[in-house]
Image (cartoon, helix red, strand yellow):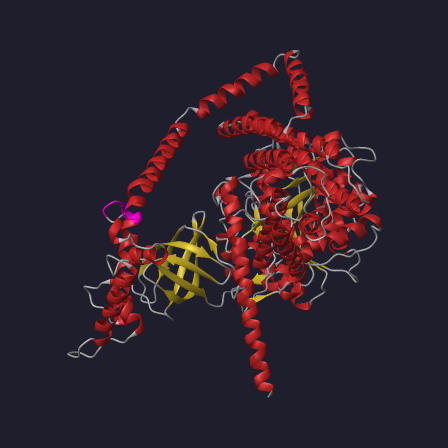
């Protein structure tokens, strides 16, 4: 049975179930549905007066409206707005509805069929072959020393002429259409060269817009308009810089392969594993400890250290029982960096592997990462991605988990690989290995800023050491649970990057190559988006409300330059980043965080000593959904500003007698876009209910059930967590809630049984909750689940790839949903306050 057939069966069953509940007969009409929605079915043998009178009323109103089929919803809807044809004209004029069906509908169907055929014909073209030809041609050109520089010089000359040639709005739009057609063609071609071409076209459109903005639009009339105009120009200049640096950084990512270790394990180096913790619960730390102990490495060369800055007796007792070293200190100076540096003086391993206490490594982590050090003696750092098996606040509150890429996917999926091409991969504080000698040479982990990880990597690169980024996920952890925690974490990152940019600027000082300076600078400058984003969110009110002209240009000229820039930039970004961030989602993330990072980054830039390290809470839960009114206050202020701008724009459309209608319309469109982004921010602020402390992770592997009567049953797992496991239903197996059994899961050739109790049974799924596990069973469970070598290999395949229009549709839907949630939350809060007042009375 196909999916469509199953859907029809389910729909029919649902309608039958509803009909039985309402008392609608099996042979039913629309009239029966209408009557039974408002009147109970009569007792058996009694006449149905409600149906008779309702039918009579419908026939009466149908005669008055001219509805030919009284029970046809289509006729009712049509006649509600269109009068029936007059009797005297009936012979001369056809029914408008019939005319619409006979003319407009066939035209629409014909055009749609032609569009689909054209799309199919375009898809059938040999794009892969053409892309291969381009790549082969580029390789041939690259092998001739004189040809590549000559072509680059010629292309740069043509590009410069095209980017600075003035055009009238009509000619500019024509130029844009030609370039857009070229970009859409390049977008279909695989390979690096079409990607570079798309980036070049986007930068061409940007430079044309930038040149026009700089030379034609800054002649402002009054000082107040000059202030507003130059604020907007500065915000735009910031986005131009970030766009160019981002293209350079990510245009050619390095997909680094694993370097094999020597065959003789006796030649492998010693490794100390550091797991720093401060205030996290023991339930969060345990899986990381067990997984670290289970990594495939010679036991004599691996030592695991629990670095407890909380100085908690239960952690010390657990470390002793688990067989790991417990390290603490008398103070919390320099937070996590100080904790690691204190442990450096107490351990002797040649290499240091560092994991946040919630990041659980796979058994293959060291075998995947250590080969780079053995191959390259100058390598001081190998970093792997931070992967999260729980949804962050955006994914949970918006319902986009695994459908839209995580906020951090762009950095760990693309940016770090782009950095790696230029030997500029950063240390990210966890899921990484560092060589002890270079780390001690730079004084240990950096303590001058609150982003000690990136600063440490910068110091290592200044000393001439290399780094490597392995894009294969080898550890997974918990994302932030609430929007407030997420904002706090991102604010700390932003403050720390601003501190580094101020006190150890990558553009200054010795030791870095040009592209290393570019990569570090882009990472730091990215976090200064707070003020530019706030300018974009508030600038429309300057014109719509205060009548300030901050761009001295006509609406047609503005549209002819800004539309090509925006369209081509989105096409290029979608091609480069589409697997890791969908179009327009960057604006959502920035709109949520802009208010909170604007002040810290500004203060840190001028006074880098301010600010302290804040630990991100992990392992919590949200018992009931609620609106985080405290965090969402800035969005409400920004929303009020934009709503005022819309109101002022509507007033001016009528009051100005259409003299500036085009300019008002463009500015109002900008305002509507801002309102959509703020709606998405409000949607994120509606915290969704989360009652699970242990998060479920999808995993389909063979398992065996050991039943209480001694029989066994083969099955497959569907998901797992630290507290239980889900199974696909086993045909013929009958289980009841509360039944006790054991479930066996394998690690390699060995199987490990875990006692469990049935907590959920459905036709397709069985849910088991683990009973009290011993310490050894907890370790075995982690080895069979989180610590599997293949646990996270498919993370890059999750979710659909990006299309700009689809990304815009996603954001629009989220924005509308945000306002719906806001209204519901406000209504719920109002009811709660009224009930409280009544209780007091």
Residue 347 visible in the displayed image: no
Q: Is residue 578 above or below residue 347?
A: above
Residue at horizontal 53%, vertical 18%?
Answer: 136
Q: Indicate the quadrant where residue 567 lies.
A: top right
* Number of numbered discs on residues: 0
Quarter of the image for residue 731 reads bottom left
Write down the region rendered in magenta.
91-98
Q: Is residue 153 visible in the rendered structure shown here?
A: yes
- 6 relative to 818 in the view: left or right: left
420 or 489, which is in the foreground?
A: 489
Residue 406 in the image, given as x and y percentages of width and height? 56, 48
Work out which residue is located at the far front of the displayed protein and give it: 88
Residue situated in front as seen by the camera: 417 or 490: 490
Nearer to me, 696 or 171: 171
Report x, y in % for residue 787. 53, 50
Q: Main secondary structure of the magenta part?
A: loop
Q: Write down the quadrant of residue 521 in the picture.
A: top right
**Residue 195: within the magenta?**
no
Task: Indicate whether residue 93 is drawn in magenta.
Answer: yes
Q: Quadrant of the C terminus?
A: bottom right
Residue furthest toward the left?
45
Q: Observer-nearest residue: 497 or 702?
A: 497
């Amino acid at each position: 049975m196909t999916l469509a057939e199953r859907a029809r069966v389910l729909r029919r069953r649902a309608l039958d179930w509803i009909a039985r509940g309402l008392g609608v007969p099996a042979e039913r009409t629309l009239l029966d549905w209408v009557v039974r929605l408002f009147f109970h079915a009569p007792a058996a043998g009694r006449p149905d007066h409600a149906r008779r009178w309702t039918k009579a009323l419908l026939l009466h109103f149908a005669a008055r409206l001219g509805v030919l089929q009284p029970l046809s919803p289509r006729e009712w809807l049509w006649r509600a707005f269109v009068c029936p044809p007059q009797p005297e004209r009936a012979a001369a004029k056809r029914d408008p509805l019939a005319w619409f069906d006979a003319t407009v509908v066939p035209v629409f169907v014909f055009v749609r069929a032609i569009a689909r055929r054209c799309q199919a014909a375009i898809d059938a073209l040999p794009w892969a072959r053409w892309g291969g030809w381009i790549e082969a041609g580029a390789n041939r050109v690259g092998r001739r020393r004189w040809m590549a520089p000559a072509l680059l010089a010629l292309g740069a000359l043509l590009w410069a002429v095209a980017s600075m040639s003035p055009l009238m709005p009509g000619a500019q739009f024509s130029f844009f259409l030609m370039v857009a057609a070229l970009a859409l063609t390049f977008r279909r071609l695989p390979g690096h060269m079409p990607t570079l071409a798309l980036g070049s076209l986007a930068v061409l459109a940007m430079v044309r817009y930038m040149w026009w903005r700089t030379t034609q639009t800054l002649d402002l009339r009054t000082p107040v308009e000059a202030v507003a105009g130059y604020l907007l120009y500065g915000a735009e200049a910031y986005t131009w810089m970030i766009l160019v640096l981002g293209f350079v950084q990510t245009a050619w990512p390095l997909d680094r392969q694993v370097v094999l270790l020597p065959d003789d394990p006796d030649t492998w180096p010693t490794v100390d594993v550091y797991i720093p913790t401060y205030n996290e619960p023991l339930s969060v730390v345990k899986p990381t400890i067990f997984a670290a102990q289970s990594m495939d490495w010679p036991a004599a060369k691996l030592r695991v250290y629990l670095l407890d800055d909380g100085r908690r007796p239960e952690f010390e007792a657990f470390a002793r029982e688990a067989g790991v070293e417990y390290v603490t200190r008398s103070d919390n100076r320099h937070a996590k960096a100080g904790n690691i540096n204190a442990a450096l003086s107490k351990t002797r391993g040649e290499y240091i592997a560092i994991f946040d206490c919630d990041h659980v490594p796979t058994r293959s982590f060291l075998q995947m990462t250590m080969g780079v050090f053995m191959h390259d003696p100058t390598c001081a750092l190998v970093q792997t991605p931070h992967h999260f098996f729980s949804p962050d606040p955006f994914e949970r509150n918006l319902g986009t988990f695994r459908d839209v890429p995580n906020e951090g996917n762009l950095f760990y999926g693309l940016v770090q690989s782009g950095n790696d091409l230029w030997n500029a991969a950063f240390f990210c504080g966890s899921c990484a290995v560092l060589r002890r000698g270079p780390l001690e040479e730079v004084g240990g982990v950096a303590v001058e800023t609150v982003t000690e990880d990136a600063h440490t990597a910068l110091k290592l690169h200044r000393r001439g050491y290399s780094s490597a980024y392995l894009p294969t996920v080898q550890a997974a952890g918990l994302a932030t649970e609430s929007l407030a925690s997420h904002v706090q974490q991102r604010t700390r990152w932003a403050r720390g990057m601003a501190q580094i940019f101020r006190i150890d600027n990558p553009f200054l000082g010795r030791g870095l190559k040009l592209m290393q300076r570019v990569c570090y600078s882009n990472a730091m400058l990215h976090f200064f988006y707070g003020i530019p984003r706030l300018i974009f969110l508030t600038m429309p009110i300057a014109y719509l409300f205060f009548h300030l002209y901050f761009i001295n240009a006509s609406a047609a000229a503005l549209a002819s330059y800004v539309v090509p820039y925006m369209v081509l930039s989105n096409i290029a970004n979608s091609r480069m980043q589409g697997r890791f961030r969908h179009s327009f989602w960057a604006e959502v993330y920035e709109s949520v965080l802009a208010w909170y990072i604007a002040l810290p980054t500004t203060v840190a830039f001028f006074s880098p000593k301010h600010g302290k390290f804040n630990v991100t809470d992990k392992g919590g839960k949200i018992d009931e959904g609620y609106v985080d009114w405290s965090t969402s206050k800035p969005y409400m202020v920004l929303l009020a500003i934009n709503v005022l701008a819309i109101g002022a724009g509507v007033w001016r459309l009528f009051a100005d007698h259409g003299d500036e209608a085009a300019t008002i319309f463009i500015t109002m469109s900008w305002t509507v876009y801002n309102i959509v982004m703020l709606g998405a921010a409000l949607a994120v602020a509606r915290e969704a209910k989360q009652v699970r402390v242990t998060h479920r992770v999808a995993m389909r592997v063979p398992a065996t059930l050991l039943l209480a009567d001694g029989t066994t049953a083969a099955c497959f797992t569907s998901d797992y967590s630290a507290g239980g496991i889900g199974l696909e239903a086993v045909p013929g197996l009958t289980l009841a809630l509360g039944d006790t059994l054991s479930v066996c899961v394998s690690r390699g050739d060995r199987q490990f049984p875990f006692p469990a109790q049935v907590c959920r049974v459905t036709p397709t799924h069985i849910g088991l909750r683990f009973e009290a596990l011993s310490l050894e069973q907890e370790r075995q469970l982690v080895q069979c689940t989180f610590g599997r070598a293949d646990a996270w290999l498919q993370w890059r395949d999750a979710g659909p790839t990006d299309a700009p229009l689809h990304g815009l549709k996603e954001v629009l839907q989220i924005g509308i949903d945000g306002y719906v949630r806001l209204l519901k939350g406000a209504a719920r809060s109002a009811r709660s306050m009224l009930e409280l007042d009544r209780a007091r009375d």
